[in-house]
Amino acid sequence: MTEQKNTVGTYRYRILALVFMATTINYFDRSIIGVMAPTLQKLFDWSNKDYALIMVSFKVAYGIGLLFMGSIIDRFGTKTGYTLSIVIWSIFGMLHAAIRPAFSLIGFITARFGLGIGESGNFPAAIKTVAEWFPKRDRAFANGIFDASTSVGAILAPFIVGAIVTVEGKNWQIPFLFTGVLSAIWIYLWIKYYQKPEEHPQLSKEELKYINSDSSEESSEGIPWLKLVPKRETWAFALTTITDGVWWFYLFWGAKFLAEQFGVDINNIGPPFLVIFIMADIGSLLGGYTSGALIKKGWSINKARKITMLICAIIILPVAFVPVITSKWLAVFLIGLGAAGHQSWSINGYTLVPDVFPKKAVASVIGIGKMVGVVVAVIADLALGAVLDKAGNTGYFWAFIIAGLSYLTILGFVHLLMPKMTPMDDNLDYIKA
C-alpha cells in the first residue's frame, strides 16, 4: 500500500497544506476579537448589545460576500478568487488597529464588515480546492485536515493575545497587525505554487489519474445561480450550515461566557480554549476519517455521510447542560465535546456538495448554503445580546439548549430533502446508477 501511494504521488497534500495555512490565518484573524471581548468591552464601554452589533456587522458582510465570492471563485478560478479573498480580509483585519476610542463602535463595525467580505471567500475556495485535488473517497478526510486549522487559529489566538495584551487592554492593536505578515507570506506561496491539477507542471500523470478516478470530465462553461437555487440538494446543504451559528457562538461568545460564569480573564483564557479547540480538531479528523473509511468498506456515500452526521448529532447533545454546570473544567469539556461534534458534522456537511454537484458549481453552492447559516447566526447574535442586557446570563441557558438539540432536528430535514444523494452531471441532470 505504501508503494502504491509513492507511485501515485502526494503533491495534492502540498496544496492542502496551503489551504490549511490560509484557514488558520482566517480563524486567527476572526478569533482575536472574541478572545479580547471582555477586555475591549470594558476598554471601550460597550454594552452586550453593542458587542452583538459588531458581531452582526461581520456576519452580515460574510453573508453578502457569500452571495458573490462563490461565483467569483467558480468564474475566475480558485487561484485568483482565493488571493482576492485573503487580500481583502488582511487589509480590514489590520485596519482594526487604527481605530481610536472615540469612534470605537462605528470603527469596529466598519472594520468587521470589511473583514467579513474578505473572509467569506475562504470556505468556498478551500472546499473547491479539495474537490479539484482529491477524489470523492478522500475528500471528507482532506476537508477534515484543513477544517482542523480553524481550531489551530482559535487556539493560537488566546495564547498570542494573552502574551501581548494586558487585562486593561494595553497593546490590543498588535494582534490585528500580526495577521497581515502571515497573510503576505501565504499570498506569495499561493501565487507561486498553485495551479489546477490539469495544468500543474509538477503533478505526475499517475497522481492526476488518481485525483480524477471517480469524477467525470466537465466542461468549462459555468452554471448560473438560477439553475442551482431550485435544486433540493442546495437547500439540504444550506440546512447543515445553520449550525454555523453554534460554532460562532463558541468562538465569539465563549470567552465572555467563561468570564461571566467562572471569572476567566484574558490572561487565563488560553488553557480552556486549548482544551475546547484541540477536541474540535480531533472531531474534524475523526469525522473525515470515519465517513471515508466506511465508504472504502463498501458503504454508499449517502449512508456513510449521514450515519457519521447522526453520530455527531448525538455526541453534541450534552452541551445543553453547560449553563447548569458549576465546575469550570466540566463546562469546558462539554463545550469541547460540542465543538468536536460540530467540526465532524461540518466537514461531512461540506463534502455533501462535491458528492452530488459537479466541481464547477461547488463554490457557488457553498456560498448559497453558508449565506443561510449566516442569516440565522445574525438573528441569534441580536437575540442573545438583547437577552443578556435585559435578563443577565439567562441568554446563555437558551443558547446552549439550542446548540445541543439543533443538529438532530436539522439532520432529519436534510434526509427528507436529499434521501439518496444522487450525483448530478455537467448539466445538473441526475446520473443514473
Image (cartoon, rainbow, N blue to C red):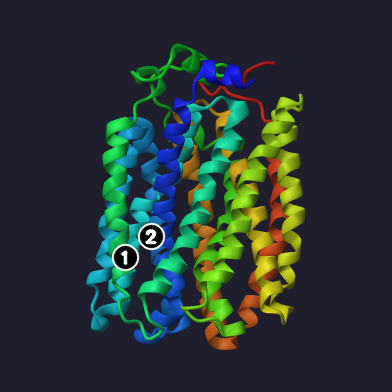
Residue kind at label 1, given as amino acid type: Phe
Tell me what residue is drawn at x 71 percent, y 45 percent. Answer: 309
Which residue position is annotated with label 1? 176
The residue carrying mark 2 is: 29
Q: Quadrant of residue 174?
A: bottom left
Q: Position of residue 61 (x, y in %)?
A: 37, 58
**Quadrant in the picture for residue 82:** top left
Q: Mark 1 and mark 2: span between their CA atoms? A: 7 Å
Residue placed at 52% from the left, 80% from the top? 386
Measured along the vertical axis of the image, is residue 99 above or below residue 148?
below
* Image coordinates for residue 81, horizontal then vertical, percent: 33, 38
Q: Are marks 1 and 2 in contact (CB under 8 Å)?
A: yes
Residue at screen point 24% across, 84% down: 102
Q: Amino acid under label 2? A: Asp
Query: In the structure shown, which secondary structural element does the residue marked by tag 1 occupy?
Result: helix
Query: Does residue 294 sit above or below 159 in this rendering?
Result: above
Whether residue 259 is situated above or below residue 253 in the rendered picture: below
- Quadrant showing the C terminus: top right
Mark 1 or mark 2: whose residue is earlier in sequence? 2
